[in-house]
Amino acid sequence: MVKPGTTITCRVSYKPNGIKLYEEEQVDLRVEDGQSEYLNVSGTAVETKCETQPAQLNFGSLADSESVDMFLSINNVHAKSSAIFMIDPDTVPSCIKISKLKGKIYP
């Protein structure tokens, strides 16, 4: 409750979700027995960059139902910010299995 003629301070925190670099939302401040106000909030996440090692994987020639495991390193090359990565499972062919489709890589 805010008494007449007084002010309160509210903490507003922003935590980027890692999916969009720029986010903008509108917060509804409801006032009982009064007119609602709207607060526009926006924020920009620090863009990070990841590199893969090796840059490509070549499984060579394999017989039907033969399986070969290879390893891929995802490196966050940003010095200060964490990187959130996600591999869209809908883009992975059924013959490929990836052990980690999403995660956070600290600097």
Image: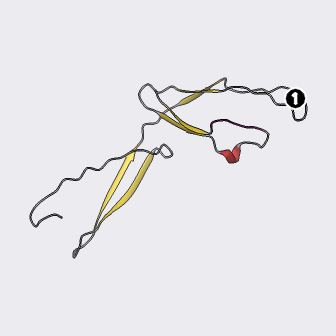
Count the numbered circles shown: 1
Q: Which segment did they paint magenta? A: 96-100
Front position in the image: 66 or 12? 66
Helix, strand or loop at label 1? It is loop
Farthest-out residue, left:
5
Q: Tell me if 18 is positioned left or right of 38 in this view.
A: right
Q: Give neighbour class at mark 1: few <14, some 14-19, many 20+ (Cα, 10 Å).
A: few
Amino acid type, residue under disc 1 in the picture: Leu
Q: Residue at x 18, y 64 (%)?
A: 1
Q: Residue at x 64, y 44 (%)?
A: 88
In the displayed structure, would residue 94 be above or below residue 58? below
Q: Tell me if 89 is positioned left or right of 66 in this view.
A: left
Decide whether residue 85 is among the magenta residues. no
Residue 6: x %, y % from top left: 10, 61
Rendering quarter of residue 53? top right
Q: Tell me if 90 is positioned left or right of 15 in this view.
A: right
Q: Main secondary structure of the magenta part?
A: loop
Residue 92: x %, y % from top left: 72, 42
Front position in the image: 16 or 64? 64
Q: Residue at x 79, y 39 (%)?
A: 95
Farthest-out residue, top:
54
In the displayed structure, would residue 76 be above or below residue 16? above
Residue 94: x %, y % from top left: 78, 43
Residue 54: x %, y % from top left: 67, 23
In the displayed structure, would residue 30 be above or below residue 95? below
Rendering quarter of residue 65? top right
